[in-house]
Amino acid sequence: MPVKLATSIKELDLSGLKLPVIAIYDHPKDYPEYYVARVFDTDRPTDTIILKDTLAAVQEDIRDNTNMIFFNRGADDDKCIVGAWM
């Protein structure tokens, strides 16, 4: 699936998603130089991501531009997952 790269959550229209979830990754294998915010619809990944240089930049963008709440990763989640905004 081709990737849609956004620079901010403000650019995205999440209204068509049943339950938007934004998972935050700490330098995953496919983007080892960045923190990545991947947009999911419930548990299904969409084609949209946001790349940032720091975790603070990702968290600030989502916190300041949505009404979502952040949840830390679960014990069974991949180690590169920081958590998810819901």
Image (tube, grey):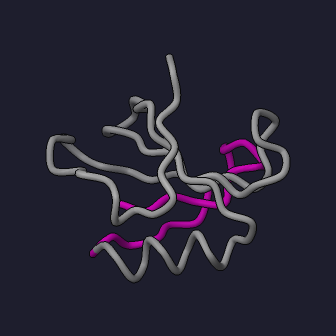
Please name the predominant secondary structure of the magenta segment in the image. Answer: loop
Decide whether residue 19 is among the magenta residues. Answer: no
Residue at point 21% right, 41% down? 17
Residue at point 46% right, 63% down? 8
Q: Is residue 26 left or right of residue 42?
A: right
Position of 13 relative to 3 (above/below)? below
Residue at point 66% right, 44% down? 77
Q: Is residue 66 left or right of residue 30?
A: left
**Numbered range of the magenta stretch:** 67-86
Question: Residue 74, image x and y in percent?
Answer: 61, 54
Question: Residue 73, image x and y in percent?
Answer: 61, 58
* The quarter of the displayed image where residue 82 is located: bottom right
Residue at point 34% right, 76% down? 65
Question: Residue 69, image x and y in percent?
Answer: 38, 73
Position of 32 relative to 62 (above/below)? above
Q: Nearer the viewer, residue 52 or 46?
A: 52
Position of 5 relative to 26 (above/below)? above
Decide whether residue 76 is among the magenta residues. Answer: yes
Quadrant (top left/top right/bottom left/bottom right) for the C terminus: bottom left
